[in-house]
Amino acid sequence: MISEYEFFIRIALAAFLGFVIGFERESKAKPLGVRAFMMIAIGSAGLMMVTVNFALSTIASDPDLQVDPTRVIQGLVGGIGFLGAGAIISNSSSGRLRGVGSGAAIWAVGGIGIACGMGHLFEAGVMAGAIFATLTGFDLLTKKTDAPDGSEERHEDDSERSG
């Protein structure tokens, strides 16, 4: 069973890592920010821990029962993918999709929450670092090289905000 103390630590780490990724998105004026990313990470971690505790208590009370906690992971990944799809919009005039990075980040933060909930805290931290580095590093790279990633749309948006 996951103790109350361990539950708190895992939730706190999931919230912090969700905050880090959400702050990166919010600082770039993306549609989803800190609250959404924190809620996804916290919800994923919490559901995993409740499921693990349920599975362990069920097996302890009746060893003949079959419990498969990995089904919750499958449900979380699908549900979070649905949330991520909601962040993606199409600009019909240009044919370009917008929000794909945020949609992928939502899905990845769900993975961070699942890792925290399962007690894989080091792995969750590494995942968060890699996601953060990808989001910030790629933006820096595309700004320096003027790569066609939709950054021209961002520059237009930036000039509209400043003007």
Image: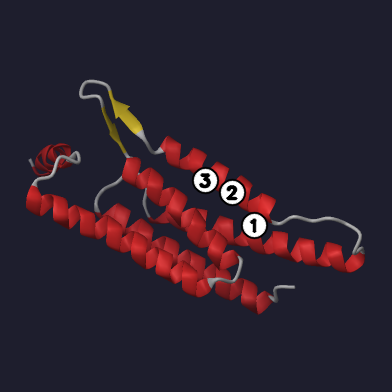
Q: Residue 80 carries which label?
A: 3
**Which secondary structure lies at badge 1?**
helix
Q: Quadrant of residue 64?
A: bottom right
As displayed, is residue 105 above or below residue 99? below
Q: Which of 58/29 is in front?
A: 58
What residue is at 9 percent from the left and 41 percent from the top? 159
Direction from residue 161 to residue 7 in the image, left or right:
right
As displayed, is residue 140 above or below residue 87? below
Is the C terminus in the top left, top right, bottom left or bottom right quadrant? top left
Between the C-alphas of marks 2 and 3, the distance is 6 Å
Mark 2 and mark 3 residues within 8 Å of each other at the beta carbon: yes
Mark toward the start of the polypeptide (2 vs 1): 1
Q: Nearer the viewer, mark 2 or mark 1?
A: 2
Q: What's the amino acid at mark 3?
A: Ile
What residue is at 61 percent from the left and 66 percent from the top? 118
Count of numbered circles on the image: 3
Q: In which quarter of the image is residue 135?
A: bottom left
As displayed, is residue 65 above or below residue 120? above
Q: What's the amino acid at mark 2?
A: Leu
**Which secondary structure lies at badge 2?**
helix
Q: In which quarter of the image is residue 130?
A: bottom left
Q: How crowded is mark 1: few (under 14 residues within 10 Å), some or many (20 or more)?
A: some
Mark 1 and mark 3 residues within 8 Å of each other at the beta carbon: no
Mark 2 and mark 1 residues within 8 Å of each other at the beta carbon: yes
Residue under pointer 1:
47
Residue under pointer 2:
76
Q: Which mark is residue 154?
A: none
Provide residue 162's location: percent of width, then percent of height. Answer: 10, 44
